[in-house]
Amino acid sequence: MKKELTNREAVRMAIDTAMQKDERVFLAGEDVGKYGGSYAVSLGLLEKYGPERIVDTPLSESGFTGMGIGAAMNGMRPIIEIMTVNFSLLALDQIMNNAAHLLHMSGGQYNVPLVIRMVTGAGKQLAAQHSHSLEGWYAHIPGLKILTAATVQDAYDMVHLALADPDPVILFENSLLYNMKGVLDTSAQPLPIGQAKVMREGKDLSIFAYGINLFKALEAAETLAKEGIEAEVVDLRSLRPLDDETIIASVRKTHRVLIVDEGWRSGSISAEIMARINEQAFFELDAPMRRVCSEEVPIPYAKHLEDAAIPSPEKVVDAAKAVMEEA
Amino acid sequence: MSLSLEKAKQFYRQMLLCRRFEEKSAELYTEQKIRGFLHLYIGEEAVATGIIDAIEPDDGVVATYREHCHAILKGIPPEKVMAELYGKMEGCSRGRGGSMHLFDKEKNFYGGYAIVGGGLPLAVGIALADKRMGRKRVTVCFFGDGAVAEGEFHESMNLAQLWELPVLFVCENNLYGMGTYIERAESEPDLVKKAKSYRMEAHRVDGMDVVKVNDAAKKAVAHIRSGKGPVFLECQTYRFRAHSMFDPDRYRTKKEIEAWKEKGPIVTFRKYLQKKEMWEKIDAAAIEKAIEEEVEKAVDFAEKGTWEPVSDLTKFVYSEEVTS
Ligand SMILES: Cc1ncc(C[n+]2csc(CCOP(=O)(O)OP(=O)(O)O)c2C)c(N)n1
């Protein structure tokens, strides 16, 4: 079945269908119930499923994230919503020291089938404590899986992929994408975790991006095409595991690399991708790799400063041209 | 309440097994057979013994890094615990957890956790799952007085009471968090009062007296099983050894330690049994001998254990890699 809807509706529909299908699934987080979710993702679900399955929690990020881990260890399939990635730092102890480590630490006995959803990214002038992109950080941690939906199809599929997974999965949702429309095909076989997707074919250079920056990359590719540069745009989708195969195949085809990543440059996922290309396909490169990242500042409030701090289609175009000129 | 001879024997045996197992561990540590952090429970045995006796095998236990006795009393064979301390593949966590991370899914031992306070939210979640799925289980969560200062303690108390979850919070108040005396860490050192501020059913018990701990635990478990929500139990106890094998123990006096040793759980229990004229009947010498053999057997098992091949190093990071 194909239909047009927003990312917000796609996530909601995915949670709704998952809750219908599996009684073990519940959603918990701050204001997910009565309020309808701070980004209105769970609007209407409380009325449908009641407070035992759409659980409003107090402001206790560590407490309710750890609660989700315990519930997952004991047979349930919790979805924990953390309002914003910045607040997830209060739950970092539970996410890393418990969720990510338990299977290994217990010698393979306790897996944690937990799903954590959180909002990431800048662009709404929310200043330094509400605007960061820390998914690259989380991708550093073995034991976690990190998914970043850009399209409506992925917004829907990834909830199901995450729930079906026996291990802790974190879904990063960009608030600016919630209103974006797209076509969802509920009968399509979802692309598995750990697989990237070529969104636009091209022969001149590869642009790797994820989340909202995928659309900035696609927009840049349009501009570049008008100037005769055919960029291939790859949606990374999954930051852990990373799809080395698709990344390297694209490099072998275009021989030039540009990465768009809203994380800070130092120690970012873009750095990791560069390192892997260096390890696996160095001699395929015709030019030094480049990247467009966030400036190394806490994201500022003022609009012009915020815009200057994060990737934009213009920055992507400029960086792509620079890569092309160096070859 | 008076104790049956059977129970008397069991308690004596369990506390002594814990004591001897750990004395042996300390010895093996100095021989460098066991490495890493080793936190001994010596002096506190009455707490784990009295509490775990009050629950069923199906009930869950979440513990800290000072959890050898909790693990053994929950039913993990001492040899599997010892093998874990050795880091052997036959250990209860395959040698990947060590002293601080004992696990046994079959025994519903949800693990030893080394981040102070970190186990409490898990206990809340385990209990929530039981309540939602209509299971009549209780989850016991052990932690020290140090954990009471952490945010996760307060978050967990609030959530558990708010949602009336079947958790028994057992605070093993041994007065010290490493070297910090409780009065220097808590603006309100009355922990029962703290728990009551969450409207939680809360009691204080002499943690050196296994009979009293057991009575309090039975009442608490009955309360929880009847669906009335969580209970907080403060067990006042004392560790006779240093915090860990690395701790020079400079923050308290010998006199203080000796005074507590006089009311140690095994001494106290022996006096109780003598008063009740049960002491002669439990045959302490036979118990002692059997335990000696059990500990020896555990060491032997650990010695004979094998090392996990390094080629398996990256196993158990994700579930699909779980093959055995
Ligand atoms: C979050 C955290 N902070 C600090 C430590 C270091 N640490 C380990 S044990 C301990 C003392 C804890 O005391 P308590 O909770 O009273 O337990 P006890 O050791 O007395 O059984 C500390 C500070 C830790 N493991 N975790």
Image: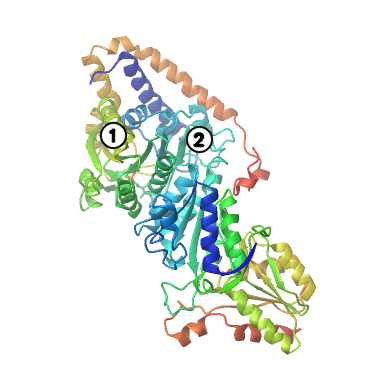
**For the residue marked with disc 1, what is the amino acid?**
His
The residue under label 2 is: B104
Mark 2 or 1, nearer chain start: 2
Q: Chain letter for mark 1, please.
A: B
Where's residue A254, x and y in %?
A: 77, 76
Q: How crowded is mark 2: few (under 14 residues within 10 Å), some or many (20 or more)?
A: many
Which quadrant is the C terminus of chain B positioned in?
Answer: top right
Name the quadrant containing residue A5.
bottom right
Where's residue B79, x and y in %?
A: 51, 27
Name the quadrant containing residue A151.
bottom right
Q: Which of B38 and A198 is in front in this view?
A: A198
Toward the top, the furthest residue is B281
Queried on whether the Cβ of the residue with tag 1 lies below 8 angstroms from ligand 1, the answer reads no
Where's residue B304, x and y in %?
A: 60, 28
On residue A128, which mark appears?
none
Say left or right for B116 vs B277: right
Residue A290 lies, with reference to residue A1, above or below; the image says below
Q: Look at the image and tell me whether residue B21 can be seen.
A: yes
Q: Is label 1 in a helix, a strand or a loop?
A: helix
Q: Nearer the viewer, residue A67 or A324?
A: A67
Residue A285 lies, with reference to residue A109, above or below; the image says below
Where's residue B239, x and y in %?
A: 31, 36
The residue under label 1 is: B223
Say left or right for A234 vs B204: right
Task: Kindly report the distance in space between the C-alpha atoms of the residues bearing marks 2 and 1.
Answer: 27 Å
Q: Which one is in front in this view, the residue at disc 2 or the one at disc 1?
A: 1
Point 37% across, 44% down: residue: B247
Q: Is label 2 in a helix, a strand or a loop?
A: loop
Q: Which of A319 and A157 is in front in this view?
A: A157
Name the quadrant containing residue A44.
bottom left
**For the residue marked with disc 2, what is the amino acid?**
Asp
Q: Look at the image and tell me whether residue A137 can be seen.
A: no
